[in-house]
Image: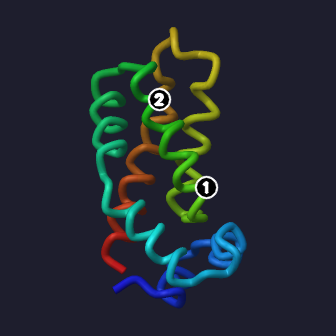
Amino acid sequence: MITIESLRAFGADVDDGLARVMNNESFYLRMVNMALADASNFEKLKAAAQTGDTKAAFEAAHALKGMLSNVSLTPIYRPICEFSDTLKGHIDQPIPPQCLPLVDEAIKQFEAARSL
């Protein structure tokens, strides 16, 4: 079960997340659980990265970036943010090879958070 303490240990910026929901812990935890329950954008990101579909990869990463920012899941947000920011304005070009490990790291952290 995800708790404030387990999120802190994971590296989430819990104070920022709580501030976004006026320090309502139960609402914050519900939002975190909702974010972690939906793997669809991670699946889209992984598939797009594997096939080299830069536009689809950017769209999935951009959606994840917003969601992860709202719940302050920093260990997942950082690689997604870097990936999204690198592709921004370059969706008509191939995905840079150095970006692919960022997808793997984000998925690894996502799975770790789901196991809290």
- Residue bearing the label numbered 2: 59
User: Residue at left 48%, top 38%?
Assistant: 61
Amino acid at dot 2: Glu
User: Residue at left 55%, top 37%?
Assistant: 83
Give the mark nearest the N terminus, 2 or 1: 2
User: Residue at left 27%, top 32%?
Assistant: 47
Residue 19: percent from left, percent from top: 72, 73
| Quadrant (top left, top right, bottom left, bottom right) of the N terminus | bottom left
Determine the CA span between mark 2 and mark 1.
15 Å
Report the front residue among 6 and 31.
Answer: 31
Q: Is residue 15 above or below residue 94?
A: below
Label ID, residue 52: none
Q: Are marks 2 and 1 in contact (CB under 8 Å)?
A: no
- Snapshot quadrant of residue 23: bottom right
Label ID, residue 69: 1
Q: Is residue 4 above or below residue 42?
A: below
- Snapshot quadrant of residue 21: bottom right
Circle 2: is it few (<14), some (14-19), or many (20+) Cα within 10 Å? some
As helix, strand or loop, the secondary structure at mark 2 comes to helix
Residue 43: percent from left, percent from top: 28, 42
Tell whether 39 sits left or right of 23.
left
Amino acid at dot 1: Ser
User: Residue at left 60%, top 64%?
Assistant: 72
List the single residue furthest toward the top: 92
Tell whether 62 sits left or right of 111.
right
Q: Is residue 82 above or below residue 115?
A: above
| Quadrant (top left, top right, bottom left, bottom right) of the C terminus | bottom left
